[in-house]
Image (cartoon, rainbow, N blue to C red):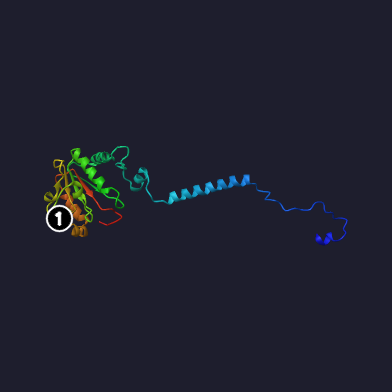
Amino acid sequence: LETMSGNADPSLQLSTAATPPAGASSPGLSLVLPIALVVGLFVAFAGALALDTMSTRVRTDSQVEQVFDLPVLARIGKPSGGEPPAYTDLAHSLAALRRDGSRPLSVLFTSPGDNENRTTAAVEAAKSLAEAGQRVLMVEADLRRPSLARRLGITAANGTGAVVLGHTPLSEAAVSVPGYEGALRVLSGADRYASAASIAMSPAMVSGLLSSVRSADFVIFDGAPLGTVLD
């Protein structure tokens, strides 16, 4: 055009000089913002849905029942508003599970890790069962960190380790908890045989211990956390 403009060409005529635009003519900001918002919401929703689908965490009672194919006996949360945790509800649910009156029902309390109130739940459930007239034997199966004797204010020379290894009969090692008139007895894990028993523990030994229980409706095991030890 510059070359042609230098020549006198009657067919060319400059009507208006071009000026650079001040901004983009399209698409307008009023159109871009809604589209970006919709796309962003869609991507965020899809990402959240994908994470929830791939997650293996259990958050609700229905998920627990679906994953483990077992009923939820009770939901025990932190005390709020002066209401105690639902240990009584748990005891009632356990009592309803005992079908065979000639044999004790054994229940293991465990948890994925430490500091999850596993022992507290076991103790309070055992107390609630004893208060309801059931004969309860608590067995401390967490021999690495025994705490039942301290919690319940009892002293025992022999306990789970002595019974499992065959050094002491169960009837002599189990100690009655004061205030329950013999309805609640405890086999403490704090004895001199605890270390050896924690190494030698086997399903056969546990079965042998259960077979020696004659005067209990329930045997409550306070176990070790599953994610910490393999007992």
Residue denoted by label 1: 162
**x and y percentages locating residue 27 in the rendered image:** 65, 48
Q: How many marks?
A: 1
10 Å neighbourhood of mark 1: few (<14), some, or many (≥20)?
many
- Most extreme residue toward the bottom is 3
Q: Quadrant of residue 76?
A: top left
In terms of depth relative to the viewer, which is nearer, 81 or 174? 81
**x and y percentages locating residue 8 in the rendered image:** 88, 59
In terms of depth relative to the viewer, which is nearer, 152 or 132? 152
Report if residue 99 is visible in the image: no
Residue at the spot 57% in from the left edge and 48% down from the top edge: 36
Instruction: Report whether 153 appears left or right of 84.
Output: left
In terms of depth relative to the viewer, which is nearer, 17 or 72? 17
Q: Quadrant of residue 134?
A: top left
Q: Secondary structure at mark 1?
A: helix
**x and y percentages locating residue 208 in the rendered image:** 17, 53
Residue at the spot 15% in from the left edge and 55% down from the top edge: 162
The quadrant of the image that shows the N terminus is bottom right
Instruction: Report whether 61 appears left or right of 23.
Output: left
Report if residue 37 is visible in the image: yes
Residue at the spot 22% in from the left edge and 45% down from the top edge: 123
- In this view, 49 is above or below 133: below
The quadrant of the image that shows the C terminus is bottom left
Task: Give the amino acid type for the residue marked by disc 1 in the picture.
Answer: Ala
